[in-house]
Image (cartoon, helix red, strand yellow):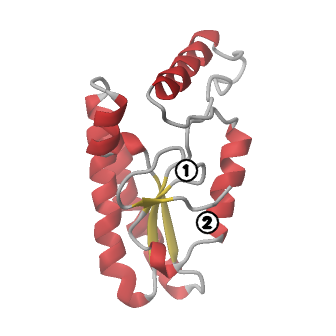
């Protein structure tokens, strides 16, 4: 299921919207990414669990890189964009309240990264979306094919902060 969503979903979405994007003035494709898809981050964070998610995100990263190279001659900028660490514990199904266990788990993740000297700030969905939109508005051709992180929580080779803050 994760491969279908994170890889095939990206491919099908790009193919579905490509004719419209090609005809339009803004030639940008932004795919939501995760540092968990990189070997460097996985090693640094000591993340042995979540293999299928990490592998699907790694495949998505490579998919975006391939599209970036293929579509660059047409003037497209294609990037991976990490939303950062977002507290989604309050986004339970309609009629349900926030999930305290999920919120506590997110807090443990922040603590884990802090213990490794990594900057990790848990954002609300609104904060994350605001930073992502700023990153998208500021995209440049030089960023084509990169993995961007508006919060610059993680600095990896080949990764750049989309918004300096």
Q: Quadrant of the N terminus?
A: top left
Res. 140 image quadrant: bottom right
Q: Nearer the viewer, mark 1 or mark 2?
A: 1
Q: Which residue is found at the position 62% from the left and 34% from the top?
A: 121
Q: Residue 149, image x and y in percent? A: 53, 53
Q: Which residue is found at the position 55% from the left and 37% from the top?
A: 119
Binning the other alpha carbons within 10 Å of mark 1 as few (below 14), some (14 to 19) or many (20 upward) gives many
| Image disc number at residue 132 | none
Tag count in the figure?
Answer: 2
| Image disc number at residue 136 | 2
Q: Residue 93, image x and y in percent? A: 63, 23
Q: Which residue is found at the position 54% from the left and 59% from the top?
A: 161
| Image disc number at residue 152 | 1
Q: Nearer the viewer, residue 89 or 2?
A: 89
Q: Earlier in the sequence, mark 1 or mark 2?
A: 2
Residue 146 drawn above or below residue 95: below
Q: Are marks 1 and 2 in contact (CB under 8 Å)?
A: no
Q: Quadrant of the C terminus?
A: bottom right
């Amino acid at each position: 299921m994760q491969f279908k969503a994170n890889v095939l979903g990206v491919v099908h979405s790009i193919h579905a919207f490509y004719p419209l994007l090609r005809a339009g003035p803004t030639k940008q494709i932004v795919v939501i990414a995760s540092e968990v898809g990189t070997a460097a981050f996985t090693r640094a964070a000591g993340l042995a669990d979540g293999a299928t998610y990490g592998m699907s995100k790694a495949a998505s990263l490579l998919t975006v890189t391939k599209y970036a190279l293929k579509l660059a001659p047409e003037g497209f900028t294609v990037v991976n964009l990490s939303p950062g660490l977002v507290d989604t514990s309050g986004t339970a199904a309609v009629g349900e309240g926030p999930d305290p266990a999920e919120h506590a788990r997110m807090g443990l993740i922040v603590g884990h990264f802090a213990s490794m000297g990594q900057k990790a700030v848990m954002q609300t969905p609104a904060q994350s979306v605001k930073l992502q939109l700023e990153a998208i508005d500021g995209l440049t051709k030089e960023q084509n094919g990169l993995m961007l992180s508006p919060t610059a929580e993680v600095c990896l080779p080949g990764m750049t902060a989309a918004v300096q803050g």
